[in-house]
């Protein structure tokens, strides 16, 4: 009789703990940081990585704030939702893909914006800091295949 009660208590405790753990993880949806928080985090990472002083950090924050919408809007793909990661449709009509000429124009525009951003960053950083920044840019290219160099 005592054994049965002990086994039932252990079973009930185990079930309660597992249900509780599942509820904690399921109810907490990860919130996206605001634009301001993202800009601040990017600036903080760069300050730490390249050893910038406070004055440089303030200037970099201004530059990152100025260029955030210009540089980040081009990188965002279709909005994803849920666990299935399916794009959210804004309307029932499929959008046509841009033509080769449009893609080339967008690429050139994005390259020009990135060059302008790098020029602003170069004004803020020392030569050593900027050299390290450029080396990092060369090593990190989103979408690059492993064989590309």
Image (spheres, rainbow, N blue to C red):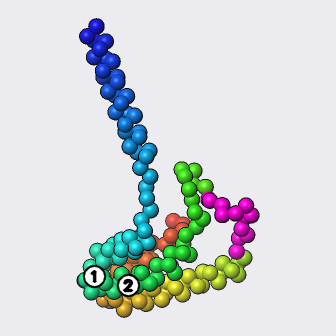
Q: Which mark is residue 52?
A: 1
Q: Which mark is residue 62?
A: 2
Residue depicted at 34% across the width and 28% down the height: 14
Q: Give percent across and percent down for residue 143.
A: 54, 68
Q: Is residue 85 above or below residue 133?
A: above
Q: Quadrant of residue 20?
A: top left
Q: Give percent across and percent down for residue 144.
A: 53, 69
Mark 1 to mark 2: distance in Å? 14 Å
Q: Give percent across and percent down for residue 96.
A: 73, 69
Which numbered mark, 1 or 2, is in the foreground of this view? 2
Residue depicted at 28% across the width and 74% down the height: 48
Q: Which residues are magenta?
A: 87-98
SS at mark 1 in the image: loop
Describe residue 76's horizontal placement relative to residue 35 as left or right: right
Disc 1 crowd rating (10 Å Cα; few below 14, some 14-19, many 20+) is some
Q: Quadrant of residue 12?
A: top left
Q: Give percent across and percent down for residue 87.
A: 62, 59
Residue depicted at 54% across the width and 87% down the height: 112
């Amino acid at each position: 009789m005592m054994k049965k009660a002990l086994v039932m208590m252990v079973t009930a405790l185990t079930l309660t703990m597992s249900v509780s753990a599942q509820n904690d993880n399921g109810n907490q949806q990860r919130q996206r940081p605001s634009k301001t928080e993202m800009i601040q985090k990017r600036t903080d990472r760069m300050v730490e990585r390249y050893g910038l002083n406070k004055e440089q950090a303030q200037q970099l924050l201004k530059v990152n704030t100025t260029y955030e919408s210009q540089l980040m809007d081009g990188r965002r793909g279709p909005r994803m939702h849920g666990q299935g990661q399916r794009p959210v449709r804004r309307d029932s009509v499929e959008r046509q893909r841009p033509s080769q000429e449009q893609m080339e124009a967008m690429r050139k525009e994005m390259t020009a914006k990135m060059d302008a951003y790098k020029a602003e960053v170069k004004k803020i950083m020392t030569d050593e800091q900027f050299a390290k920044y450029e080396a990092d840019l060369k090593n990190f290219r989103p979408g690059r295949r492993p064989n590309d160099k």
